[in-house]
Structure formats: structure tokens, C-alpha cells
Image (cartoon, rainbow, N blue to C red):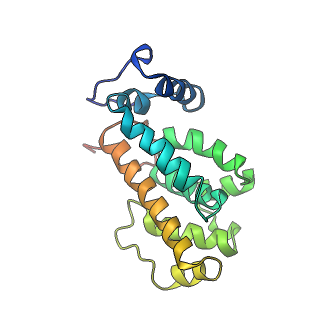
Amino acid sequence: MPDTPLRRVKPDLMPEMLRSSWEKSRDIRGDATFIETMANEPRLFEWYRDQFYGRVFHGGRVPTRLKELARYRLSTRHGCHYCNQGNRLDARAAGLSDEDLTAIENDDLDHFAGLDRAVLMLADQMLLTEHQGQLKGPVYESLKVFLDDGQIIELGMTLAVLTGMARFLFVFDLVEKEANCPFHPGD
């Protein structure tokens, strides 16, 4: 379980919009440490929910299905149990099949072709553990067949925020990590 040093705000002391997010997090992900700590600064949670998720992740010109595909790749490779609980459901709702999700979980990227494969190639370059990641070469060549440069930038910035949030969640010990998580302080 997460063991953050940050103060956890009790649900009855949260603004209503956070309380409903807290309930959803407990129901879907089995934990709400992230929400409890974000209640210390609700404006940032509102920005994350409304601006990032509302306008960028679920908005923009890149289909949400592709962002869900990439997000699930990031969260499974990063080993974020909290993220995977919700991301799996969201990926299914966006149109990814159980076979797609299993292929991502098992690192079977040969299951994918075309744009899906290109998006997963970019996601792999954006992983926290990929210190030499680059857009150049086969990643860009694969993406530009399907997306214009503006869409590639949108996808890249979306993955950058998700990757940065993963780092935040791990450093601040706000989520449960899976056994494959490469981020275990003190190991």
C-alpha cells in the first residue's frame, strides 16, 4: 500500500468534486491515496482532471482510443497497480479488445500493426526507464504515415504528462506498485 508522508484529507473534509472522485477511485482502483493528498491543493486536481484529461486526453485531434492504448502501455511497463486498475477499464471502453490488453501486458507487440504499432513504439520511447528515447528514425517514420506533425506533438505531450505523473505518483508514494515496477526506493 502507498506510504506517503503527505497529509491525507478525509473525504468528509473534501470539496464535493473531490469527494466524488475519491469514491470512484476507491470503487475502481481500490485505493484513493492520490485523491486524499490532492485534496491539500484541489486546484491542481481540477487542472489535471479538467484541462489535461478533459481538453487534451479526451479532446484534441488524436483519437482517445490511441491515447488509451499508449497510456495502458506506459502504466503496465511502469508497474503502477493503481493506474492499471482504471486504465484497463478505460481502454476497453475506448474500443481496445481483451486480446489487445493481454498483448500489451505480455509485451506481444507483434499483435499490433499500422498506427497502433506506431503509437506503441512512441510509448516505448517515452517510458521512464527509456533514457535514450528518440522520435527520430523508425518511430517518426511509422507515425507520419498516419498522423500529421501536430497530432504527433499532441500525442507526445500527452505521453509526457502521463509519464511525468507516473514519476510524481512513485516519488510521492501515492500508488501501489506492482512487482514489475522498476521504481522501488531503497532497493
Quadrant showing the C terminus: top left
- In the image, taking residue 84 as reference, residue 160 lies left or right, namely left
Q: Position of residue 5 (x, y in %)?
A: 26, 29
Q: Is residue 37 visible?
A: yes
Quadrant showing the N terminus: top left
Residue 136 drawn above or below residue 108: below
Q: Position of residue 104 (x, y in %)?
A: 62, 58
Q: Is residue 106 visible?
A: no
- In the image, taking residue 46 as reference, residue 37 lies left or right, namely left
Residue 164 drawn above or below residue 82: below
Q: Residue at x 54, y 23 (%)?
A: 23
- Extreme residue toward the top, this view: 12
- When asked about the image quadrant of residue 169, the answer is top left
Q: Position of residue 22 (x, y in %)?
A: 50, 26
- When asked about the image quadrant of residue 174, the answer is top left
Residue 105 drawn above or below residue 90: below
Q: Residue at x 35, y 50 (%)?
A: 167
* Closer to the camera in the image, 131 or 158: 158
Q: Position of residue 153 (x, y in %)?
A: 48, 71
* Closer to the camera in the image, 109 or 52: 52
* Closer to the camera in the image, 106 or 114: 114
